Image: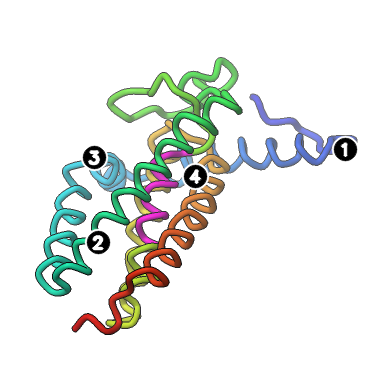
């Protein structure tokens, strides 16, 4: 088993990795059920979340006109920057193998995804992208209703599913979520100061 039996004399990084591996195995192998296998696989597919984002873009343009159009443009620019940084910069810097490709972990996990990506594991771009979107949506639309906070549950389900199916470690999605929140908040502040929606309706 990859997990160390004793944490004595371990560095802080080793302890974090120990906890990361332990949680990975709990989520991926112990805290499972057949029905959630299907939920997790479905949550990762683009045909689940792309229609929602397309609907939201139409909703913004129809209800807020030109400012709604700029909202969509800002959201797309944010998504592009976030995906570039998470996929092309951070993953390249850390070059951490995914659990489904890690020689020390691959034989221990329950891999149920359709494929295991060739790019790095840290950080999770799924987590980063969806938490960036959730933060941007909530921050710019909370004046309509605080219920827009439910989009964070959406992002959390997608992120959790990455660990559940065996393509990411817990720390990948946690750090990805934090990074996405920062990008999403920065984009929302830019939009609110330069354009804003409050006086648009």
- Dividing the picture into quadrants, the one containing residue 61 is bottom left
The residue drawn where x is 52% and y is 50% is: 179
Label 4: element kind:
helix
Label 2 to label 3: alpha-carbon separation: 27 Å
The residue drawn where x is 37% and y is 23% is: 116
Of labels 1 and 4, earlier in sequence is: 1
Of labels 4 and 3, earlier in sequence is: 3
Neighbor class of circle 3 (other Cα within 10 Å; few <14, some 14-19, many 20+) is: few
Q: As displayed, is residue 149 above or below residue 83? A: below
The residue drawn where x is 14% and y is 51% is: 51
Residues at circles 2 and 3 in contact by the CB criterion of under 8 Å: no
Q: Of residues 151 and 86, which is closer to you in this image?
A: 86
Residue 10: image location, x then y, percent: 84, 35
Q: For the magenta stretch, what is the residue range?
A: 124-135
| Magenta stretch secondary structure, dominant | helix
Is residue 29 among what the camera can see? Answer: no
Label 2: element kind:
helix
Label 1 to label 2: alpha-carbon separation: 55 Å
Label 3 to label 1: alpha-carbon separation: 42 Å
For marks 3 and 1, give the one nearer the viewer: 3
Q: Which residue is mark 4?
A: 173
């Amino acid at each position: 088993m990859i997990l160390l039996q004793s944490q004595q004399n371990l560095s802080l990084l080793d302890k974090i990795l120990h906890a990361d591996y332990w949680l990975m195995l709990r989520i991926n192998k112990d805290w499972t059920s057949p029905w959630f296998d299907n939920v997790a696989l479905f949550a990762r597919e683009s045909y689940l979340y792309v229609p929602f984002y397309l609907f939201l873009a139409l909703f913004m343009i129809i209800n807020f006109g030109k400012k709604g159009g700029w909202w969509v443009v800002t959201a797309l620019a944010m998504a592009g920057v976030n995906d570039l940084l998470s996929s092309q910069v951070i993953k390249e810097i850390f070059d951490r193998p995914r659990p489904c490709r890690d020689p020390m972990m691959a034989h221990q996990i329950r891999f149920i995804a359709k494929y295991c990506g060739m790019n790095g594991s840290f950080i999770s771009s799924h987590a980063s992208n969806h938490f960036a979107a959730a933060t941007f949506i909530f921050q710019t639309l909370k004046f309509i209703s605080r219920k827009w906070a439910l989009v964070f549950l959406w992002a959390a389900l997608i992120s959790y599913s990455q660990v559940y199916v065996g393509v990411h470690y817990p720390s990948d999605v946690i750090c990805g979520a934090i990074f996405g929140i920062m990008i999403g908040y920065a984009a929302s502040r830019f939009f609110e100061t330069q354009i804003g929606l409050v006086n648009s309706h």
